[in-house]
Amino acid sequence: KNLKDRYNKYWILRLNLAPHKISGYNVCPSASAGCSAACLHTAGNPIFQKQKDIGRINRTRYYIQEQAEFVSRLIKEIGNHEKYCVKNGFKPVVRLNTTSDVSWENHGIFDIFPNVQFYDYTKVKKRALKFVNNEYPKNYHITLSMNECNQSDCMDILEKGGNVAMVFRKDIPDTYKGYKVVSGDDSDLRFLDPKNSIIGLKAKGKAKKDVSGFVV
């Protein structure tokens, strides 16, 4: 979807870990029962799910058990991604929490690559507050994700000028609870979203059958 004309100057590098406790380690500290069951991890062709599970579990265990080596390798791969983008006329973008909620800022990665745009969704309110309060490097963007347990936190972040992602069962509305809704399915480039907006996403994978309240 990022190959559309207005987005095709960006090239995204994504890191997929095994969400929540699938690997034996919890990489989603604020996960709810609803978002754990309906995670994006299950989206896509189910034929490939077994292989995705194996790769993401191994990758997550590598990060937890050999963290210094993992981060060193990750930095090298981000550096290669930046070089590729510069050579081919793209703007380098990196999403490290595609299926996790790790505080990558603790590793200083964003400061190492000031010309790379990083972005993530999170369910950790403290991280969303830090973003709203401009406490992160300028090249890191955070969107708070709503689940069945954190609606009040999400409204608080919206009131403070931040953005919140919500999963809708059917059509994405133009407004919700008085806030403008923009489609998160047109592009995954959350740092381009207008401030103080709701990012509407259609339910995918197991989320289509959610009854927990995670899906609006």
Image (spheres, rainbow, N blue to C red):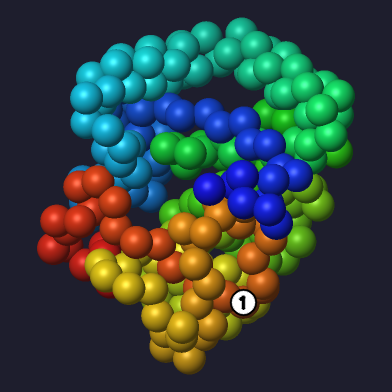
Residue 69 position (above or below residue 177): above
Q: In this view, does 132 lie to the left or right of 60?
A: right
> Observer-nearest residue: 141 or 180?
180
Residue at x 64% of width, y 66% of height:
193
Determine whether 16 is above or below 155 in the image.
above
Q: What residue type is labelled 1?
A: Asn
Total marks shown come to: 1
* Quadrant of image for the C terminus: bottom left
Q: Which one is in front, 148 or 178?
A: 178
Res. 112 visible in picture: no
Q: Position of residue 100 (x, y in %)?
A: 44, 37
Determine which residue is flagged by label 1.
Answer: 196
Q: Is residue 14 above or below residue 58?
A: below
Residue 202 percent coordinates (x, y): 34, 61
Query: Where 137 falls versus 184 (above or below)?
Result: above
The percent position of residue 12, horizontal first and vertical second, equals 64, 36
Quadrant position of residue 92: top right
Q: Write down the quadrant of residue 53 in the picture.
A: top left
* Residue in view at x 27 percent, y 33 percent: 45
The residue at 81%/52% (across/down) is 138
As drawn, which residue projects farthest toward the front?
A: 5
Q: Judge whether residue 195 can be spotted in this image.
A: yes
Residue 212 in the image: state x and y as whole percent: 17, 62
| Towards the viewer: 44 or 190 | 44
**Residue placed at 46% from the left, 85% from the top?**
175
Q: Is mark 1 on a helix, strand or loop?
A: loop
Determine crowd level at label 1: few under 14, some 14-19, many 20+ residues with C-alpha closer than 10 A.
Answer: some
**Side (left or right) of 179 relative to 110:** left
